[in-house]
Structures are given as C-alpha cells and as structure tokens.
Amino acid sequence: MTRSFRRSLAGGSLLLAITSALGWPGRAWPAEPGKGELPKGEVPKGDAGKLEELALAVGETKTLSAREVRNYSLGLADIVDTRITPDGTQFVLVGKRAGSTTLLLLNNDGSKKTYEIQVTARSEGAVQRELDQLLEGIAGVQSRRVGSRFFLEGSVGTEAELSRLDKLAQLYPGQVESLVTVGGGTVTDRNMLIRVDFFFVQYDTNSSYAVGLGWPGSIGGSAVLQSQFTYDFVAKTTTTAQASIVNQPLPRLDIASKHGWAKVLRQASVLTANGMEANFDSGGEQNFTVNTGLTIGLQRISFGTIVTVLPRYDSKSQQVNIKIVSDISDLTSGVASNVPGRTFSRLTTNVGLKLGQGLVLSGLHAQTHTHSIEGLPFLSDLPLLGLLFGSHSNGELETQNAMFIIPSVVEAIPHNSRQMVDKALAEYHRFSGDLDKVAPYEFTPPVAR
C-alpha cells in the first residue's frame, strides 16, 4: 500500500512522502486537476465538502484522525503546525500564534472535509471559567459564546461599572467584547416587571415652656397708634381693625407650656419594567404673594414625596440592583413671618438585594434642646428671682425616622420578607408619645456589635 500527504505553504507547495518516513515504498499523489493550491487563510471554493470549526489556543495540541486520508492542504503554516504520528493514523495540530486558517483533507473515496481553525491567545475553557468568576455578583450582566468569541451582554447602573467591564474585555483582546450598556435590563429579563415599595416612618415628640415677666426693650418715646382698615368698593363700606399701641411701657406676664407628639407614615409603590427608570411624585404646593418694589409676585413652596428608582433584576442570581433618589419634605410654620418653611430628607444610593429582602435605606435620630432668657440685664440671670426681671423659655424636640425598601418581581412567588417593616408599623400604631420605647431599626451597626 502507498500513502502520501500534500502540504501547501505560503510561497509554494511541499510534497511530504510520509511513506518514506514510515519505511514504506510508494509515491506522492499529485494535486487534483483544477484545484491548485489553497490560498492563505481561505476555504477552497467549489465543493469543499463537510465544514467543521476547530478552536486552538497558542501552544495547545489537538489530534484529528488521518485514516482514509489521501492528501491534505494547510492554509497558513505559521498559525498552526500540522504533524503526522509515526503510524500515520492521526494528525497532530499545534497552535503557534493567534489567527485563523483552514485545513483541507482529501479522502481516498474522493470526499473532502474542511476544518476552519481559530487560534486564540487563551483557551476557550480557561476564558469561560475566568469570566464566570469575574462576573459573579454583578447583576444584569452575562457572557455569551459565539464561535470562539465571548460577548458580555446586559446593563449596569453607573458609568464606573461600565468602564470596569470594558477594562475586563481588554484583558482578552480578540476573544472578549463588551456590549454592556448603562440602564436597561438583562437580555433575558427585559420583559419582567419590578415593584419597589418604600415605607417612611417618623416619630416626633416636642415640649416647650415660657415663664417670667417679659419687659419691653425700651420705655418712653412717642407711642404710635396702629390700626388697619379695609374698604369695600361694591358695598362702599369701611372696616377698621382693632387698634394697638406700640412701645407698651408695661411688662407682660409669660406663663405658657406646650407639649405633644406626632407620627407620620408614608408608603410609595413604584412599578416599572426591568431596567427602566420610574419616577413617583406625590405632594402639593403652598403659594404666597411676594412684594418686590411695585410688583407683586407669586412664590411656591413644594412639599411631599419624590422618588426616582432604576431597578435591574438578574434571574440567574435572584438579585435586584436598585439606584434610588428620594426627596421627602413637609411644611413647617414660619418663624419670623407668615411664610412657611420646609423640612426635608434626601437620599441618593445604589443597593443590591435578593428577592424578598428588606433594607433600611436611612435612619435619623435627632434631639434638639433650646433655652433662652429675655429681660433686664444682669437681674434676669439671677436664680429664681430672675423670673421677676425676665422671661425664661425652654424647648425640646426629638425625632426618629427610618426609610425601608422591599423589591419584588410581579407575579413571582411571594416571600415572607416584611418582618422588619411589620415590626416598625406595629410600633407606629402603638406609639402614644413615649419615644424612649420606639426602636424602628437597629441603631448599632452589625460590625460594631
């Protein structure tokens, strides 16, 4: 029996007499008429027979069966080195450098088989394992293999996360490409609806008193009689308000006390598609007039709850990453005028939660104590007797508030995840002014226990 193999190289062809190497007498088979040599890096046109893909890493070795093979032709020998085992039954392929080429096998029965060989710097198995480890814990991003290349798909919440994934892809040039965007859901979870519930609980208690004699700042001078009146042009009548005397020389008697408590509960639910931003705005406006020279303007003070949320759910890890911006405000009475003020709590954060978990986004425990004395100099500072020469006032305000969040997937299996919120709501209903017994959340961080 006679066997030989034909090998095409850049710049010419070399006939390898395998039979001579094996000690067999024989001759080299010529190339098929009209086929010629295989161009560099190209699959031969015409009837190339069966086409298969083959992946190699630089330095990696793979074998192919050489039985019933009459001739073979390799496109680029500097990418893949092809050798024959001494018994002539197997090809040994060794990756030399990154690139692609083709291997054409001509069988004894006249059939053909073409291998499209892709040589990469790292093996596909090693790249897949490393990507799985590096992407672990990153919700909304997954890798997908297409041929010998890997593509990172999905979305992240910030530009910093996107830059990190771009740098990750650059570690595998020619093998990994990032298609990740900012915003938007994962490839397989875009049609899911995500519900995010917010609970804001606040407890307030306050007390104040004023006692003593309130002396005027000055005595003497001209007394001014003030009065206010209005004129109705339709009824042609005048209404005069009660007159008052400014610079009253007599002291007033201050004796007053006030105390009370308040509790506030707000709940906001936001429903949005996975990876899509949603906004929730509930509240109102307080309008008042402002005199500026000869014109009268309208000033608005807004209050209420404003929440912006961007959830990204990954069904593979069962984790929801949420970007939250919240603004909660209330009106307060004016201090020196009839214009109201506003108290507010603002929060901007990114959190990651498993489905069914609840989280305290923020908590505030504030205490305010004020004390002031007004009256005659030096005399009003005397212990006990100072009440006859001045007015002493004291005020205390204590506040506790907390914001909770619970994410869920619509139509998903319900989870028993509201124990923490239920406890806070139960305390809300029991609250009767004693703030010492209120504990809506753990004050001590876990790492400090």
Image (tube, helix red, strand yellow):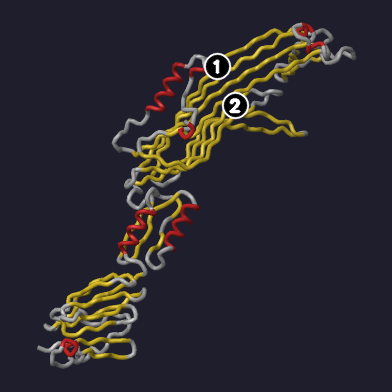
Q: Is residue 180 above or below residue 318?
A: below
> Dot 2, how many residues are within 10 Å of its Cα: few (below 14), some (14-19), or many (20+)?
some
Q: Quadrant of residue 196?
A: top left
Q: Position of residue 316 (x, y in %)?
A: 32, 47
Which x, y percent locates residue 161? 47, 52
The earlier-in-sequence mark between 2 and 1 is 1
Residue beneath disc 2: 331
Instruction: Specify whether 36 is left or right of 379.
Output: left
How many numbered badges does the structure rendering display? Answer: 2
| Residue at the far left in the pictured view | 1
Q: Residue at x 72, y 32 (%)?
A: 296
Quadrant in the picture for the N terminus: bottom left
**Residue at 54% across, 32% down:** 328
Question: In screen coordinates, is 166 left or right of 384?
Answer: left
Q: Is residue 126 above or below residue 369?
A: below
Residue at image mark 1: 261
176 in relation to 251, above or below: below
The mark closer to the camera, 2 or 1, is: 1
Circle 2: element type: strand
* Amino acid of disc 2: Leu
Can residue 370 be spotted in the picture? yes
- Dot 1 alpha-carbon crowd within 10 angstroms: few under 14, some 14 to 19, many 20 or more: some
Q: Position of residue 297 (x, y in %)?
A: 69, 33
As shown in the figure, which amino acid type bears the numbered disc 1? Trp
* Residue under the point 60% across and 13% down: 259
Question: Residue at coordinates 32% horizontally, 80% vertically from top-left?
Answer: 41
Residue 313 against residue 142 in the figure, above or below: above
